[in-house]
Image (spheres, helix red, strand yellow):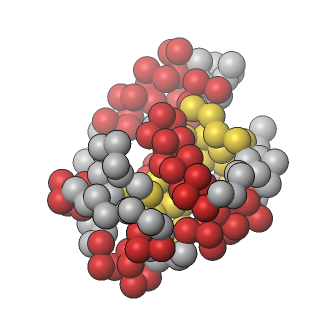
Amino acid sequence: MELICIDLEASGLGAESYPIEIAWINDETGEQDNFLINPDSAAGWRYWDEYAEEMHGIEREVAVSKGLDIKQACSRLNQKLKGKTLISDAFEFDLFWLTRLFEATGIQPSFRMAGLDRILSKEQLIQFGFLAKAQFRRHRALQDVRDIISCIKAVTATGTEPV
């Protein structure tokens, strides 16, 4: 099974938040991507939560100066991930932010999103939760994706098959 995991960092957790960093890894091929998104390239993306910044360590000024334009970000994702299903450990949040990104551009995503329950059994989800909670560090999207894949491999290596 092809395993492609994605993670997003955002300006906050509120309804006005938006994505500022995206990373994904295809565990089968080793292909990966990681980039910042320029919030000034989207109309109305002004909300910034200092607590979220403390969690991921990305300053708004850095996202503005080094981030991709939102249309470039969508095109890049669509080009690399067309027809794929991406797994997220925070499906509702990541889907919200990806939807916000694509709606801001008027571009349709060429890929699908799914949660961990698509590939893990209930027991494996519990094990995954315990492993994930043991990770105390600053959140950055690419490292988070690596950690998600490590946790998935750890809980599926026990001999129980994913659903």
Q: Residue at x 65, y 28 (%)?
A: 119
The location of residue 133, given as percent across then percent down, is 31, 36
- Image quadrant holding the C terminus, namely top right
Q: Is residue 46 above or below residue 92?
A: below
Residue 76 placement: quadrant: bottom right
- Image quadrant holding the N terminus, namely top right
Q: How many marks?
A: 0
> Camera-side residue: 66 or 47?
47
Q: Is residue 53 above or below residue 153?
A: below
The location of residue 75, given as percent across then percent down, is 70, 67
With 125 as the anchor, is 1 left or right in this view? right
Residue 153 appears in view: no
> Camera-side residue: 9 or 30?
9
Q: Is residue 28 above or below residue 69?
A: above
> Camera-side residue: 97 or 5?
97
The location of residue 114, given as percent across then percent down, is 62, 34
